[in-house]
Image (spheres, rainbow, N blue to C red):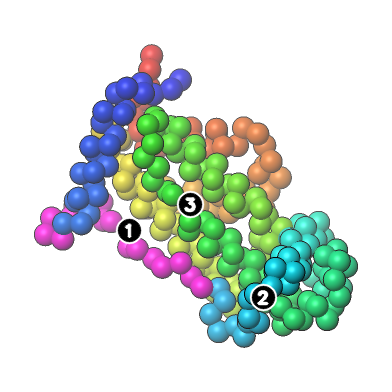
């Protein structure tokens, strides 16, 4: 069942405005029972890397992109260790020498891919304010996020494999997850202040659980299930809002 759209429209926008004003007012006391999530800057996975300059010519950009896309496809199919640079360049239609014009190693290529993923996730509007009901709004955010994730599923499979033997990648993975969890928590805190939200929800724990689920789904065959987005949005909605909001 869907929310009563007219009722939600009249309550959602004023509530969101009040929540934003409250966050900006430093003099406003915060509730000890519901501390706000700290803003965490997106981790730069390429910090300290000696990167080649971004190609300025279109032909070179196309070649570099072909290498990245070929790597994602082969990582998805074969995994990280079983994918050689020669395999990637053959798939991309270029030479091994061409690979080294853009990347110093397969590991750096993987870092570039995962950093691209984080940049695209950062661009997703996590607080849509269009004329729609809450459940649909949650679903739209999930669809945007999972669509972005799925484009890099092969890179994430390689990342999980590579970090098992690379402590630096494991440390970067912890930073990455802290950032994605923080973004979810900020959205859940905003939703938890809207009319009809359940009281006493541990928003921080919910954000941590959902973030863990999202990343695990990316490495699972369940990610292709057509009912996945609907099920996730239903779960989040019912975790945060009272059943009385639903139309009878």
Residue 99 seen by the camera: yes
Q: Is residue 15 above or below residue 170?
A: above
**Residue 246: image x %, image y %?**
38, 22
Q: Residues within 10 Å of mark 3 (few under 14, many from 20)?
A: some
Which residue is labeled 2 in the image? 55
Question: Element type at marker 3?
Answer: loop
Numbered disc in front, either 2 or 1: 2
Which residue is labeled 3 in the image? 124
Numbered disc in front, either 3 or 2: 2
The residues bearing labels 3 and 1 have C-alpha atoms spaced at a distance of 19 Å
Magenta residue check for 94 = no
Q: Is residue 114 above or below residue 196?
A: below
Q: Residues within 10 Å of mark 2 (few under 14, many from 20)?
A: some
**Residue 79: image x %, image y %?**
78, 62
Q: Is residue 160 left or right of residue 213?
A: right
Residue visible at 61% across and 74% down? 169
The residues bearing labels 3 and 2 have C-alpha atoms spaced at a distance of 26 Å
Residue visible at 52% across and 38% down? 232
Task: Tell me, yes or no, whether the two marked residues, 2 and 1, touch with CB atoms within 8 Å.
Answer: no
Magenta residue check for 43 = yes
The tag on residue 37 is: 1
The residue stretch that appears in magenta: 26-44
Question: Element type at marker 2?
Answer: loop
From the image, give the main secondary structure of the stretch colored magenta.
loop
Q: Quadrant of residue 78?
A: bottom right
Numbered disc in front, either 3 or 1: 3
- Of callouts 3 and 2, the N-terminal one: 2
Question: Element type at marker 1?
Answer: loop
- Of callouts 3 and 1, the N-terminal one: 1
């Amino acid at each position: 069942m869907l929310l009563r759209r007219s009722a939600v429209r009249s309550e959602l926008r004023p509530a969101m405005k009040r929540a934003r004003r409250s966050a900006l007012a430093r003099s406003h006391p915060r509730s000890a029972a519901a501390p706000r999530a700290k803003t965490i800057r997106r981790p730069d996975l390429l910090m300290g890397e000696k990167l080649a300059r971004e190609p300025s010519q279109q032909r070179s950009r196309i070649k570099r992109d072909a290498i990245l896309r070929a790597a994602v496809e082969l990582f998805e199919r074969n995994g990280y260790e079983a994918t050689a640079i020669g395999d990637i360049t053959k798939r991309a239609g270029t030479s091994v020498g061409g690979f080294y014009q853009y990347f110093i190693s397969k590991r750096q290529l993987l870092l570039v891919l995962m950093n691209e993923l984080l940049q695209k996730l950062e661009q997703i509007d996590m607080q849509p304010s269009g004329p729609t009901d809450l459940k649909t709004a949650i679903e739209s955010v999930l669809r945007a996020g999972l669509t972005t994730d799925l484009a890099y599923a092969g890179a994430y499979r390689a990342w999980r494999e590579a970090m098992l033997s690379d402590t630096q990648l494991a440390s970067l993975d912890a930073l990455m997850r802290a950032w994605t969890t923080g973004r979810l928590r900020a959205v859940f805190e905003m939703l938890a202040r809207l009319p009809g939200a359940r009281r006493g929800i541990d928003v921080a724990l919910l954000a941590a659980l959902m973030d863990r689920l999202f990343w695990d789904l990316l490495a699972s065959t369940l990610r292709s299930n057509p009912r996945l987005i609907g099920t996730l949005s239903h779960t989040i909605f019912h975790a945060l809002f009272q059943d009385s909001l639903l139309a009878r």
